Image (cartoon, grey):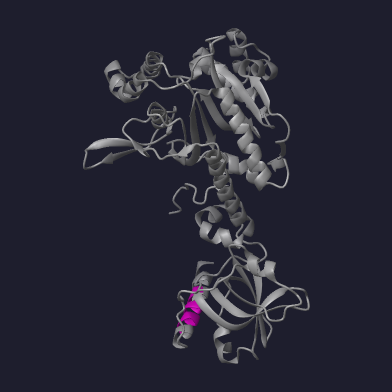
Amino acid sequence: MTEEKGKLEQQRLEKLNLIAQMGKDPYGQRCDGIESASAVKARFEDDNPAQRAKCAGRIVLLRDIGKLIFITLRDCSGTIQIGMSKKLMAGDWDFLKLLDLGDIIYADGQLARTKTGEITIWSESVEILAKSLLQPPEKFHGLSDIDIRYRQRYVDLWANPEVLERFKTRTAIISGVRSFLSKRDFLEVETPMMQSIPGGAAAKPFMTHHNALDIDLYLRIAPELFLKRLLVGGMEKVFEINRNFRNEGLSPRHNPEFTMMELYQAYADYNVMMDITEELVCELVEKNCDSKQIVFGDMMVNYAGQWRRAKYADLLAEFAGCKIDDIAAVRKKARELGLEKEDKMGDAVVINEVFEMTVEQNLIDPTFVIDYPAVLCPLTKRSRENPDYAERFELFIGKMEIANAYTELNDPQVQYDNFVGQMEGAGEDESTLRSLDDDYITALKYGMPPAGGLGIGIDRLVMLLTSATSIRDVILFPLLRPSK
């Protein structure tokens, strides 16, 4: 197979040399006055014989029938047919015979509809803009090998038009998030990607080293603590859409580099965050999807109507069959599920393990899971009615966590105590804790207003709204094991 590929590449190299000998640049020049294929089709009028068009794109279909050559040209907007006749282009006929599938060209000429109804540019001028030296995927099956599709996204995008459409939708979704928040007076900000202290989430970071300062730095696992510093500074509504990095495993729902939207609003709480989340996602569905019922894997997700809001403890009782304060029953359930055998996990850990195993697989339609056990939420304000629970929610759609939100903790002493408890559990000493938490605690001591905070996983949201069941299908260049 490799030998055959080598022969095909050699044949194309020979064609490239022949094109160059004809005085044409096989890699083209600037090309002005180009219209998209979709724009040309949209403005076409059957009763107007004076129409012209100039399009550029990649050859994805080529039919040579002697004195006529028909090409299907694909650009970012779609496809258009190019017709070339020996009568019109006799002087360039030898050149046109050297064109191959995959070449990038432009064509300029009269616009008309063929007998079969196809809108066609009857070319009077054709120039090559880039000679393709490698054979494109077979036309009827596209690029089907999953691993190659991810490694060669540059081929996948034009070989499989639905892939390009998915990424155009991703762009529209992110633009929609920005527009939604801008209309509500949120300021978009940027916070450090490299941080001296990894914080804002419980995850293993990637580490690097800054030579000039001779310090270790971490790629951020979350922007949370910096965004909340801005609340202290008087920026009352802020958001950021950017990358987070977590040195963890790969799966259909996890990529070590992923896109997150986080926002914080002063004088709000997690109920406000729920309202914002529901309004935002429903608006994105309305603008980017054909229906409010969207297929996701083997599920049909219904975004219409009022979204369910259910307490963590109530869902545990509903699907696990045990009450959250009956730890013996929860541990028994954990043993039945094979989650623990010797009762060595802490109470909070075992409760959450059982919850993840029994509840999350039942949350298909949008569901806000509210009021988490406070011990699981070190950055969250506790409920005034019952301090054993935190004012936190996670949004689940299609059995997948999409968003996480809190009523933010703004008491510096409680926050410090929570950090101490976290780090002592990890075996750190208190002197290290003080250096780790000092600046954020200092910020809180100046006073942070009561606030609500929200994080939405953009990649997972795009998965849901485009019916993509793997996160790799919505990230242009997902992390892969090297092929060699």
Q: Work out whether residue 252 can be spotted.
A: no
Q: Which residues are magenta?
A: 9-17
- Indicate yes or no whether the magenta region holds residue 267: no
Q: Is residue 395 above or below residue 480?
A: above
Q: Residue at x 37, y 31 (%)?
A: 198
Quadrant housing the N terminus:
bottom right
Based on the displayed image, in which of its 4 quarters is residue 297 positioned?
top right
Instruction: Please state which of residues 444 and 399 is positioned toward the viewer in this rendering.
Output: 444
Q: Residue at x 49, y 15 (%)?
A: 375
Provide residue 420's location: percent of width, then percent of height. Answer: 36, 16
Provide residue 116's location: percent of width, then percent of height. Answer: 78, 75
Instruction: Please state which of residues 48 and 227 is positioned toward the viewer in this rendering.
Output: 48
Q: Residue at x 57, y 48 (%)?
A: 170
Provide residue 124's location: percent of width, then percent of height. Answer: 60, 85
Instruction: Please state which of residues 353 and 310 is positioned toward the viewer in this rendering.
Output: 310
- Left or right of residue 373: residue 208: left
Q: Main secondary structure of the magenta part?
A: helix
